[in-house]
Amino acid sequence: MRKKVTLLVSMVLTAFTFCFAQDVVVKGSIKDKDGAPLPGVSVNVKNSKIAVSANGDGAYAIGVAPSSTLVFTMLGYITQEIPVNNKTSIDVVLLESVSQLTDVVVIGYGTAQKKDITGAVSSVKATQLENENPQSVADILKGNIPGLSVGMNTSAKGGGDLLVRGKTTLTASTSPLIVLDGIIYIGQLSDINPNDIETIDVLKDASSLAVYGSKAATGVVAITTKRGKSSTPTINFNSNFGIATLSKDQPVYDGPGFLAWRGDVLRSAGTSPAYIYNDPDNLPAGVTMTQWLNGQTTTNPKDLWLTRLGLLTNEKNNYFAGKTIDWYDLLFRTGQRQDHTLSMSGRKDEINYYMSLGYLKNENLIEGGEFSTVRTRVNLDAKAAKFLNVGINFQYADRDEGAIEADWGQLTSLSPYGDYYNADGTLRRIPTDDNGLNARNPFLNPTYNSRMVRLNTLFGSIYAKAALPFGITYQLNFSPGIDMYRTFNASSSLNPNVTTPGGAATRAQETRYNWQVDNLLKWNKTIGKIHNFDVTFLVNGEKYQSWYTLSGNEGFIPSDVLGYHNLGSGVKATVSSDDQAYKGDALMGRINYSLMNRYNFSFTLRRDGFSGFGAANKRATFPSAAVAWTFTEESFLKDIKWLNYGKLRVSYGENGNRVVDQYSSLSSEDLVKYQSVNASGVPAEVNGIIGGTRIGNPELKWEKTKSLNIGLDFGIINNRINGALEYYDKKTSDLLISQTLSSVSGASNVISNIGAVNNKGVEFSVSSKNITSGNFQWSSNVIFSLNRNKIIRLATPNNDLGNGWFIGKDIDVIWDYKILGVWQTNEVAEANKFNKGIKPGDYKLQDVDGNYVYNDSDKQFLGYRNPRFTWAVRNEFNIYKSFDLSFQLISNWGQKAQDNQGINQPGSVGFGRTSSYVVPYWTVDNPTNEYARLSSGLSGTSFNVYRKSSFIRLNTVALSYSLPKDLIGKVRLQSAKVYFNINNAALYAPDWNTWDPQNNGPTPRYYTLGLNISL
């Protein structure tokens, strides 16, 4: 009995002691190294199930035993363990992890930590580029994703085409699929405000792309927008102003230079004595005025000289009046730019929200060019019940693209001695007194015509996510989108370039509507702590419709002053319409299996249906499989201290490309109307003839790309250096190609699945934390990409010379005559053997077969239009926790570009009535081998000049200063930052000397000054 009483007392005392220990409550705050609160940090009692999360202000409170140890964990930060030791207050500063393995990436209808994925996915955090003020999605991606090429768009709208891992098709779209917040997005990237973007993930291999099946052969760009992070509302205002200037001048001739150049043109083209084109006041030594007159008589030698040079009456009058016009200065300007975004975000109890409103207005380099847009976004997530989460994401944009640019392409055809205005003050149609064959005034259309191009787009998604028994979740997504386009044009009769009496006007309106429905069933289960299953099933449906109407009229009575506002007052009305639609559906299943966090397997199967393909092939199946081995988890590698992480990945699968005209499989017919005339010659009824243009193909199907990817991920030296190495091999078959038909078929072409293309490549990326001391931090990122493609098969066994496609060669190979140099004066006899009137100063082309005849047999493969490899380097510095400096170099190397300016050959009206860029040219006194003579004879054939266009570009330089927190705290600001950046800051192109090698035209350099504040 005594033993039982003793045992009972001991149990009571133990229970009392345990309960007393639980009464200790530890409170504190959790911040990052900059002092910003970290909401959502998990605070666990080690070796127990007791846990809480930090609130929106980074504060926490937890009841623990005095001898417990608290564990603080958060993705992207180094885990800390702190003994309680009877303390009731513990404040924590978490440091960012230098490893990227815990970063969350989009894998298609879900997310995963980078360490768990089996596919090739590259990511960029848009928030890390805020100092560089990216104004488009393309700006965020450029130079930051290996294997992704970003084109250049120098318009006020900006942006650029995207290409993932080379060209996989000859005629279908090469643009990657865009996924916005988990939903397939078919709108324009310019409608997405880059200030709203959190991260962008680019999916590149078959394993990661397979969940999108028929839409994913050209890659996927997955954009994730921002969400609320703090429990208190955070208001952010980002505002900047900037200018756009010419990054490189490509001047044309001024007045004196134009006259000297005109003289050289005529000396090169004519047979008259060279000195007759000299200024009579500056004759060569030994030449008399009598010789210069060359049998002509005049009382005004200067006037005769100008006439010989081809100047017309008003040009000569302006010369004698000392008047010139600088067309270059008139056409190009310093563009003004502004970009403002106001956002509010937060999370409170069961609601997470982010809202923004942005305004962007850009002028480009060309007079009249302008783009503006208003963009707004609402992201709202809520926990409606214990088992149910709901949310909406909506994006609206209003774009104005109606500005009319001056026609800068006229620049090299305009005389500096021309006139801008007529005597009555109206714009002169032709700046010189010629017969209309010369250049038009480049400002006619901006001055007299009017245009409105407004585009209103709304894209959104509504979702509900329910937690079901056994760890199963069901999610329903409904994603509607509507685009409304209005394009109104009026060509005024006041415009001397408009030949329609009474003027002309059109109004085009189009409405596009689409919707998608995703039914997602997911199950995630861990068994025995070492087996993890993640299963996803999808049922998808979609529909797209568009309605387009075009109406127009001409000959407005009594006046066309109302332009497109009064179409009914014209006398020649026209109307047309075009409505289109397509449907699609899909079934998809994906199983991800992980064994001991060491071996990962992924299997995906998707079956797609699309109304645009032939009746026999409206559906297709796209499978994929992948395996990954985290070899650093093996015991035999644990002793290698410098190797912190290593994973080998292999994937293989098939994807499709369906981005073709939705009626490609159907026959196409055109209705041609004509006016019949009776026997008396009086117009009678209007008749119509239906003619076929395309034969239908019921067998038409997807282009299919089979892809192998081998990847290696690594982290070394305490994960201060992380990187990835990728090799891929893709073969695209069943290429969609238009075949020309014989006229006896009654149609001109048929779309068929013929041909195959192969793409192989290597990608490398590495990021490093070079210096991580308190007052100075330096990090770097390097990427490298190499792609080789080859045409394997075409419609026939022969090459397609018309399209420049050659079996066994790259899609972008250059096939033309090889230029050996320029014929010199001591080679006249050899040049005459071609019997083509070749003269010294003409380009010397290689005669491969030596028969003194230039034909296709002499053409050779000269290089490639696309880079042989690309690379980029980014360096980021933080100094005294206040100054941030970054710069990025990008390079395209090994490509060639067309540069026919060096041919120095006249256009349709000849050099008798044109100007030129200031570029070198061959003369007897300047016997260059790089440029032809003026008025070159083209060596008796037609060819193009290609020059190496490799370059290294200093793409961005950015500097920011964060104001001290003790200073801004006095005005209740969370943060305030001033930044300055230069985009396209410098260029090195050793073999290219005209405009920018990436854009053969005026290219902007942007200077931006901005302010970012949060409160």
Image: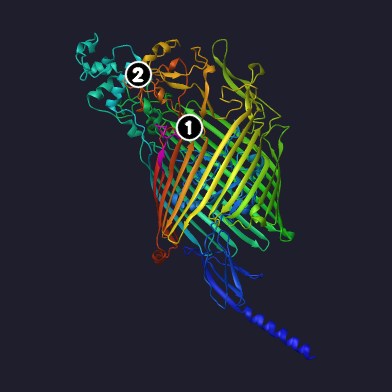
Q: Which residues are magenta?
A: 984-999
The residue at the far right in this view is 1
SS under mark 1 = helix
Residue 139 in percent (x, y) is at 48, 45
Left-right relation of 1014 to 209:
left
Nearest the viewer among 151 and 739 is: 151
Taking the spot 40% from the left edge, 17% from the top edge, the residue there is: 823
- First of labels 1, 2 by sequence position: 1
| Quarter of the image with the N terminus in it | bottom right
Left-right relation of 472 to 162:
right
Q: Which mark's residue is nearer the viewer, 1 or 2?
A: 2
Label 2 crowding class (10 Å Cα cut-off): few <14, some 14-19, many 20+?
some
Nearest the viewer among 233 and 740 is: 740
In three-dimensional space, the C-alpha distance between marks 1 and 2, rounded to whole angstroms, equals 43 Å
Taking the spot 63% from the left edge, 38% from the top edge, the residue there is: 729
Residue 726 in percent (x, y) is at 60, 43
Q: Which mark is residue 445?
A: none
User: Hey, what amino acid is under mark 2?
Assistant: Gly
Q: Is residue 506 visible?
A: yes
Please identify the quarter of the rendering in which residue 104 is found: bottom right
**Eyeballing the image, is 85 above or below 157?**
below
Residue at mark 2: 912
**Eyeballing the image, is 985 above or below 40?**
above
Please identify the quarter of the rendering in which residue 789 is found: top right
| Quarter of the image with the C terminus in it | bottom left
Residue at mark 1: 567
SS under mark 2 = helix
